[in-house]
Amino acid sequence: MSDRNPLLSRRRLLLVLGAVLTILVAVNVANKFGPPGTGLVAGPLVALLLIVLARRAGLSWHDLGLSRRTLIPGLRYALGAVAVVAVVYAIGAAIPLTRPAFQDVRHHLHLGAALLTALVVVPLGTVLLEEVAFRGVLLGLVNRHRGAAWASIVSSVLFGLWHILPSLRLAEANQAIGGALGTDTTGQVLAVVAAVAFTAVAGLLLCELRRRSGSLIAAAALHWATNGLGLLMTAALATLIGT
């Protein structure tokens, strides 16, 4: 439903957006500087809070990508997305030229720890909150008031900015990025800029998948596959190289 008074509609949008962004900034800082496991606890709780806030602001389950009517199409897109990422990662890991992209010291884990991280920490501590926030609440809010194009752009730009703090040491942690950009201050700044730009573009892809499927499940599956399968591939390569 939309307000008859355009000023009221704009004011509601700004108020809710302001509340959502304030919550996300607080969570982002807590994830970066808080105790280990902060995201695993805060992610589901904040995701639920954002859904409640969006519903009270007038968004429907369909606006949030959580409608039962789009569940089956969402699952179909989800399975296809995971399969595509798995194939791309397998090819990338098999080719010596692209293999360094998987050599990230942040993910040099034993198999058990890698499985726990990929199957529990990533979906609950990362994917759930980010998909609800960016492809659910923010996309739904802006789409309701400004249309699909603006919704995708705003959501994706904010998704890129969300990754500033997590990418501060990216050049040091990832061999391929560090080798290409350097690990000095300039290289670290370029790595952050590249990470923000890349994740913003990835956000556009996730928004389009969400739009086509009508379901948040499809975007969440692609998001998980990109992170979770990448982590498992990195851990597997580290184990093989170590032996």
Image: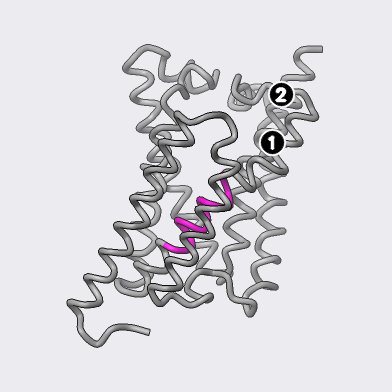
User: Which part of the image, by quadrant, shows the C terminus?
Assistant: top right
What label does residue 10 carry, if any? none
Is disc 1 in contact with disc 2, using a CB cutoff of under 8 Å? Answer: yes
Residue type of the residue flagged with mark 2: Leu
Magenta part of the chain:
126-137
| The one of 217 and 56 positioned closer to us in this rendering | 56
141 sits left or right of 221 in the view: left
Label 1: which secondary element = helix
Does the magenta-highlighted stretch encompass residue 118? no
**Above or below, 210 relative to 192:** below
Q: Identify the residue shown where x is 75% and y is 15%.
A: 241
Q: Which of marks 1 and 2 is nearer the N terminus?
A: 2
Q: Quadrant of the N terminus?
A: bottom left
Instruction: Examine the image and state in which quarter residue 180 appears.
Output: top left
Judging by the rendered image, the residue that carries numbered circle 2 is: 109
Q: Quadrant of residue 144?
A: bottom left
Above or below, comparing residue 209 to residue 143 in the picture = above
Q: Mark 1 points at which residue?
A: 117
Q: Distance between the residues labelled 1 and 2?
A: 9 Å
